[in-house]
Image (cartoon, rainbow, N blue to C red):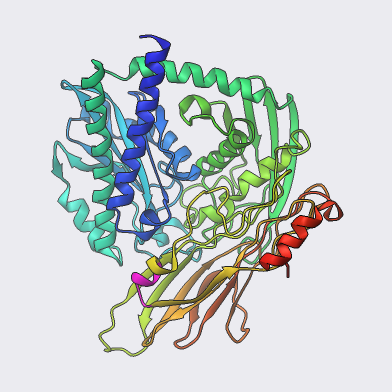
Amino acid sequence: MSDLRNQVMWNRLISIVEEQALTLVRTAFSTSVREAGDLSAGVFDLDGHMIAQAVTGTPGHVNTMAAAVANFIEDIGRDRIYEGDAYITNHPWKGTGHLHDFTVVTPTFRTGRLIGFFACTAHVLDVGGSGFGPDANDVYEEGLLIPIMKLIERGEVNRDLVNIVHHNVRESNQVVGDLYSLAACNETGMNRLDAMFDEFGLDDLEGIASFVFERTRAATLDALRQLPAGTYANTMQVDGYNDTVTLAVTLDVTDEGVHADFTGTSPTCPFGINVPIVYAQAYLTYAMLVALAPGMPNNHASLAPFTVSAPDDCILNARHPDPVSVRHVIGHFVTDLCLGAIAEALPGIVPAEGSGALWNFHVSARATEPGSGLPPVEILMFNSGGTGARPTLDGLSATAFPSGVRTMSVEATEQVGPIVIWRKELRPGSGGDGRQRGGLGQVIELGPTEGYHFDFSCMFDRVANPARGRQGGRDGAAGDVHLDDGTPFNAKGKQRVPAGRRLVLELPGGGGFGDPDERDPADVEQDRTQGYLG
């Protein structure tokens, strides 16, 4: 097969997995998938190596899913893989890092012969246990863990498994519906692949996979040459759960790849902010690729040159049964941590630090009066602070980096439960000053509708440790959480918003880049006109 034909096939595969992901977006029950795009989708070869991934999705999902499919093959066993099967897990250490992410893997066949796999991942609203939040002390408290097993065998749904899920989660219709959406997503990929094979007279993925991996590896190693071989280090402090957490990395860069060692990072926490190392690796890999090869298609060969290690008791190397429910809060900082290590070597590329962690809030809305007939409701909304300023551009306001998920709209959130969002606006003065200004955070004011109060799970960061500026840029503003009368809230843990009261979230801004005195006066005037200055 010619290189041109192989390139066409590669592009076609990317289109197929993008349609696979959009099927999940269109059929999902959870707003985190429909509105925010908190998902991943991809196609894999017979060894579980990812050939192509959908553009729709997050690095944390995509890069951990890329490692997960091999676990499915091993646990199911090649002799038990049948046409019409679909496999499932939310195992944090064999999947994508916490129980709220379900991964479904579906084997794909051609003329009765196994030729590869489709896989997808999505965040579901509830998995039982203590709910989505950092308060549990081990993974058993955090919810229902489904080991790698068959959701569907030879076309027959595992009704017992579905029944167990149905009776162990608070929003059973949404969660079970999402499991079927995941299976449907893979089915779309399989159907489109089959049509592609019919069109081009192909019978397997082996030739395309070899072409993709060969070209990608060469391009990735070529991109790495921008970074001189050597050792680079960085440390960062973030809030943690009541105690500041130190994140440390040493990067060893060679012509063959980058190895990150997290020795010096704080130990594991008694609460659920710990990070399985596969998730830390996902955001190291993203940091390196976004800095060195931002246009590189993501697949097995682009991920393979990036490896990690960490001490056993490290918060970035959580082990079973450590609690990991909100592993994203610390895990998302790995990207800025690793970018900071190479900032001096790539001064025109690496931005200042940003707000990093998403400001997700998970609400358990409950009736204030027993017997009122008002149903309990679970509500999840994603929100983002500002990104760090870039060497030649201001930071992005209210934008999720590095996760890339979208902020859920007010309308979509209010539609799913008894919540009113009274205010959602950019936070003036929150972006760090610099030659380039840091991105702004937001101010969000919300509360329960009449007859309800909120049990509210806080999982916020950058309240005690704001994003740092770079090359003379100022720090971004720290975040803050309080009631409308000024009563302070802790940044992490379950708390209550009483009936008739409102919660105010002031999201952090990104750090500035360069000397503020060098900022273009026209940009300063534009900031003033737009109301961006505090």
Figure quadrant of the C terminus: bottom right
- Res. 142 in view: yes
Left-right relation of 433 to 243 = right
Residue shown at the point (27%, 30%) measured from the top left: 77
Residue shown at the point (42%, 51%) measured from the top left: 38
Vertical placement of 251 versus 499: above or below?
above
Tally of numbered tags: 0
Vertical placement of 51 versus 485: above or below?
above
Q: Nearer the viewer, residue 340 or 260?
A: 340
Residue 363 x/y as whole percent: 43, 71
Q: Identify the residue at the far top of this view.
A: 2
Residue 359 x/y as whole percent: 54, 62
Q: Which residues are magenta?
A: 413-418
Figure quadrant of the N terminus: top left
Residue 518 x/y as whole percent: 85, 51
Query: Is residue 416 highlighted in magenta?
Result: yes
Residue shown at the point (79%, 54%) measured from the top left: 434
Vertical placement of 104 versus 462: above or below?
above
Residue 319 x/y as whole percent: 50, 47
Left-right relation of 119 to 134 = left
Left-right relation of 376 to 152 = right
